[in-house]
Image: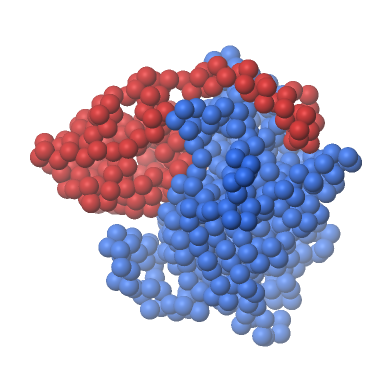
Amino acid sequence: MASKPRTLYEKIWDEHVVERRDDGTCLIFIDRHLVHEVTSPQAFEALRIAGRKVRRPDLTLAVPDHNLPTTARLDASGARLPIADQESAQQLAALEHNVAEFGIRYFHATAREQGIVHVVGPEQGFSLPGSTIVCGDSHTAAHGGVGALAFGIGTSEVEHVLATQTLLLKRSKSMEVRVEGELGTGVTPKDVILHVIGRIGAAGGVGHVIEYRGSVFEQMSVEARLTVCNMSIEGGARAGLIAPDDTTFAYLKDRPFAPRGEQWEQAVAYWRTLRTDEGAEFDRSVLIDAADIEPSVTWGTSPEDVLPITGVVPAPESFADPSKQKAARASLDYMGLEPGQRLTDVAVQNIFIGSCTNSRIEDMRAAAEVLRGRKVHPNIRWGIVVPGSGLVKAQAEAEGLDRIFIEAGLEWREPGCSACLGMNPDKVPAGERCAATSNRNFVGRQGPGARTHLMSPAMAAAAAVTGHLADVRDLAKEPA
Amino acid sequence: MEPVRQVEGRAYPFGQKNIDTDIIIPAHWLKTITREGLGQGAFEVLRKEDGNVFDDERYAGAPILVAGDNFGCGSSREHAAWALIDMGVKAVIAPSFSDIFSSNAFKNGILTVVLPQEQVDRLVEVAQTETIAIDLESQTVTTPFQDRFSFEIDPFRKACLLDGLDEVGLTMASDAAIGKYEMQLAASRPWMARGTGLAA
């Protein structure tokens, strides 16, 4: 095996095989398990019924994010405010009970460290290069941004990991997505991943793990890489990852759960070996020229429905595949759009800047840069900025970004998943449109009847200022 | 998990592609802390449409769903599998499934059958009037019109489904191997073994 060149994915896989069965199924060791309130209660309940324990509470970290309201969590005296929704409150209480019973490290709802699980993991140095990371959430792919093999699992698998710290898996196929060249002005990591999904399709990565390679990813910050890997699942791939490098090591150094001292040196030496070998073969390769990527938005109800902001709404007949034609017709009907309509003519009423895709400090800065000295358009009825964690919130406030958002006319909220999936009170009204930095434009995702257009934080800020989908490059030309 | 051998009966002739788990079960149903009762919320948005297959009397209680490409994409919510079970669906046939959904379905004893698009199209047609039969042992799908389609399935999954095995129990039998791996990990990558720093 040592002589055969291997991909990064194969290296991480091989390192985690506990047992290999005759049919190729492997028992894979899980280094890091992240737990939140929505997909874990039934798993803990199953452990209780079977009289089982959590095998490695020390490799498990829990934080609530999906259900929490993003309005104030403490009253004037510093006491915790109750959650009005009874079911949400019950689910949070169940998590609090479970972490106490099973001895799991927990960031409670009002802790500074609380936030969206996929923001918290890397921020705390819990997510490390070369590790296997799972969570009962499909956007776990995000942690691939630090060079980890990270993927979402269902609740039965959450139970399996809690009980055994392993999963039974078959190795996936490998796909290389290579983007070379220089990104144009106004083109952000979100535009890169939207473009990739548009290219490969929502099912393009099914059965594959993606490795993002090439100069564009090498030059990206870790936060940018987390944004890219996060949406691998929207291209059908359960995981996506980027080889760790000096940028990764600098990002992780001195974070709370990252190794220290001699172990840090040992870890970095090992992490440097985590690269795809020269001559290693991928099952599929997709090559993209960075110059072809423009600031992008989605027009339909699948994340593959991506176009440059300079484009027009497509005619369903323009698709070769009959089932795609049918899907496009249904999408346009749901979205209230006409073929041929210019994307920049589409008025929006709601703005959502946040989610595990785009709620880190660099995202906050990018949105604030566009909004600085500007006001949101009168068309905008509701606009919220939801930082990814309490630490992102504190950093943004230290930089005065919260003032920029508030002065522009947006609300500055507490951390959580929020309007990305509308499990908490943050929802987009039926029939209204939202410029969103989240990851899914599915029917009803942001609330029943809500119409979602996915885009980067800078583009969402541009939509806020103009009241319609807008090209951030046009705004840059005008003084604020 | 209950053993699965055959699934036979009427089938919802659905066939839409890229059906995400938000469509199968919307987020507001995820606030439950149990697995039961989610059938009421299954396909809630589609059920508001006139003439939808889920409220068509001909298919009421059908144990099979004939779906489109990339079925179950999006969110990892296992509630989608629980919702299908609660509405009586025991098998889904489609040209492809999202990886996470197909795993979730399997863990709950739902058979996911992958067939080429043209065979799925044929089954959508047959399902309008006739029953469909799936036999896991022989890995075939048959119709009263003598259609006979073979499908592939992972041998491990097949064995688990046929025997109704508890996967966690099965893995716990590998306790010694996991323990050995953990010892090696603590020696070779001690920073990984450190975790959150709490004692195991």
Give the x, y percent position of residue B37. 40, 30
Residue at image position (60%, 23%) is: A163
Vertical arrangement, residue A302 with respect to residue A115, above or below: below
Give the x, y percent position of residue A167. 55, 31
Give the x, y percent position of residue A83. 63, 39
Residue B69 relative to residue A241: left or right: left
Taking the view exactly as shown, the residue that stands out farthest to the top is A51
Drawn colour of chain A? blue
Residue at image position (66%, 67%) is: A215
Residue at image position (43%, 77%) is: A312
Residue A130 relative to residue B34: left or right: right
**In terms of depth relative to the viewer, which is nearer, A389 or B132?**
B132
**In terms of depth relative to the viewer, which is nearer, A230 or A245?**
A245
Residue B25 relative to residue A279: left or right: left
The quadrant of the rendering that contains the C terminus of chain A is: bottom right
Residue at image position (55%, 35%) is: A39
